[in-house]
Image: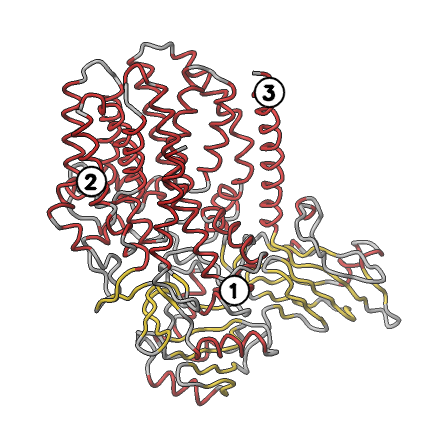
Amino acid sequence: MKYKLAFLIFAILLTVNIFSHVPKDSFLFLHDEYLILSDQEDFKQFFTRNPNNFGIANTTVMLVTFFDRLYYSLTFFLNISTLHAQMVLYFLKFLLLMYLPFVGFSLINKLFKDETRVGDFEVFVISLWYSFNTYTLIFLHGNAFALTLLLAYVLAPLSFYYFHRSVFEGDILSKLKFIFTLFLMFFSLYVFAVFVMLLTIYVFLYAFAKKITFGKVMGNLLSLAILFLPLLSMFILIPYELFVNFNITTNLSGGETYNMLKGGLLYQLLMWFSWGIYTFWSPRNIFTFSQYFRTFPSLVAPFILYGIVIYGAIKKKTTILIPIFLFLFLFFIFFSKGAQSPFGEIYKYLVENNFLFRLFRSPDNKFGFGVIFSMACLLIFVASSVKKSVFIPLIIFVIAIQGFLIFNGVAVIGENKKTSTDRIISLSTEQQNLISFINKSNLTYGYILALPTTDFGHFEVGSNDLHIGQDLLPKFLKLPFIHLADNTGMSSKLYKNLSGLIKNEDITVLANSPIRYILLRYDVKRADVSKSLIRELKENFKPIYTTKMYELYENTLAVPIIEVSNSSISYDYPVKHKITLKNVSDPLDLNFYEGFNRDWYIFPIKRSKEVNLDANIFDVKYLWQKPAFADSHVLLNNYGNKWKISSNEIRSLGNEFFIQNADGTIDFDAVIYFKTQAIFYLGIILSGFYLLLVGIYALYIIKKR
């Protein structure tokens, strides 16, 4: 109870310390953070298709930020302001970051009590180090330690405990608890992958060292796999997107960030789990306090831990746990250095030839998790061999050094320097006015192309104030946004075509395109738009909104996103649009200017007195309903979708799907639907139902015992 109270008080103090610096009309935005800022953005959270950049896949991004999205959906439902939502979220993060690892490591300590003989206070201090070290500092600074990622990190000790009991004791309740914790960890794909590596190596080393029959171990592993497989229904979209619905995009490789690593094994041993610590990246310096890591206490801190482990391992010769976790520690240190020497070719070969290994394109902050977890376990296993009066002060010293920038708030808030700003953001009057103009006006539905096209960089958000990170405007606007950047996920052919607008100053690429509006912006600290191109745009298109920071032009040569004659169109959801066709006689073309994808289908709607698009889109019926015109679905202009609509084919659907007019033409209603969404819904239903069964069975076992 005393530790729970300590965690609660500490979480409150950390949260108050951070937000005491944030004015009530502002919020924190940490460049890579997942943050929902408007009703428009909240509405699009759980769709597998993001309408920005001509429609891009949202599957993996949605899953790896799943719990963050759930949280922000709740705060928007409760009408909680962004600032207050962040305050509560940080409090929850700090509380989880301290409490759950302590529970997990306490159980691990009890599990191996005959070999560890460690007191509760030592475990408390070790779990605090697991909560506050350079790894957690890096994620609190880099992406605000996204809730989905944080859950995986804090559940790892608890999940490891349940795994050991499941495999080596065969306890059924532990098996159910393990698959539940592993399911929650799965959303954070790369932490999950590293954790599975750790468990795989551990189980075979432990079984071999203890001379446990491999048949028994493999039997329990198989039962765990069988129990866990139904939960993967939630993630069926990932292999589906990779193998079935694969599209070539501009960010296929995701960047070779492993080439930025330096220092070989030394930097990883120093626990510098981010190349941002030692690499200055213009125009933004990721870690503004990078010099702190080079101070004497910071350099010494990790070697204090190594000294404790080495000393304890020498004195404590009876346990096989120490050599097992020393091997795990060295294994993850080796891979966290990426393609650097020694034997960097192994890592590079795996990344470039195994698509699953691409999860580890940034190996330092991926495999760094394995390093930290292994080290925390080693500290537990050696603690009894070191005098308590020495062990506890040394660990507390390391916590104070490695967690100092978390405790004083700098890791979260950032700093104002020549190459950086803090993360306290408030929208400027110019931004608010532009957002209000677009969202409240009756502008025709179409894409907004931003020039200069910076989706991630320096943005002016007020007088003498800068925001470094993601572009804020798309997070507020109701119309889909386009950034001509090579990391956006749009079709590579389309990107090549549109980039000619800037490279060749060729505005003809805007003719007959669905880019309805061009936003010239002067809040971007970048100049990739020439004066002659700006002059051409101003000469050919009329301004509909002009301020000091923004000029919005309407492209009079644009076409609708959905183009078909004699029709009315409703853009209801990013994955579902209703079309009503009138007086169809001869075959006509339906052009849909989102990125081409085979999963776009046209489904007919049965006629009734009142035809409405389904109010409840949480359905899976489109997985079994037969689409219309599927054979005529082809690529349009190297990126879009095109169908041939035939009156004869409409008639062949049945009389309930059309109305015959007096002149022989027909009227027809349909939806254009992205079938991947239905697969996502099916996965939620299957995983949710199975979780319910697992929970009921677990309660039955607990009651029986």
- CA gap between label 3 and label 2 equals 43 Å
In the image, taking residue 331 as reference, residue 221 lies left or right, namely right
- Residue 595 makes an appearance in the image: no
- CA gap between label 1 and label 2 equals 41 Å
Way the structure is coloured: secondary structure
Task: Say if 333 sits above or below 680 in the image.
Answer: above
Q: Residue at x 56, y 54 (%)?
A: 47
Q: Quadrant of the N terminus?
A: top left
Residue lying at the far left in this picture: please name it: 296
Q: Which residue type carries mark 3?
A: Lys
N-term-proximal mark, 1 vs 2: 1
Q: Which mark is residue 198?
A: none
Residue lying at the far bottom in this picture: please name it: 539
Q: Which mark is residue 398?
A: 2
- CA gap between label 3 and label 1 equals 45 Å
Badge 1 is on which residue? 38
On the image, the x and y values in percent for residue 563 come to 63, 70
Q: Residue at x 40, y 85 (%)?
A: 548
Q: Quadrant of residue 334?
A: top left
- Secondary structure of the residue carrying tag 2 is helix
Q: Which label lies toward us, 1 or 2? A: 2
- Secondary structure of the residue carrying tag 1 is loop
Q: Quadrant of residue 130?
A: top left
Q: Which residue type carries mark 1?
A: Ser
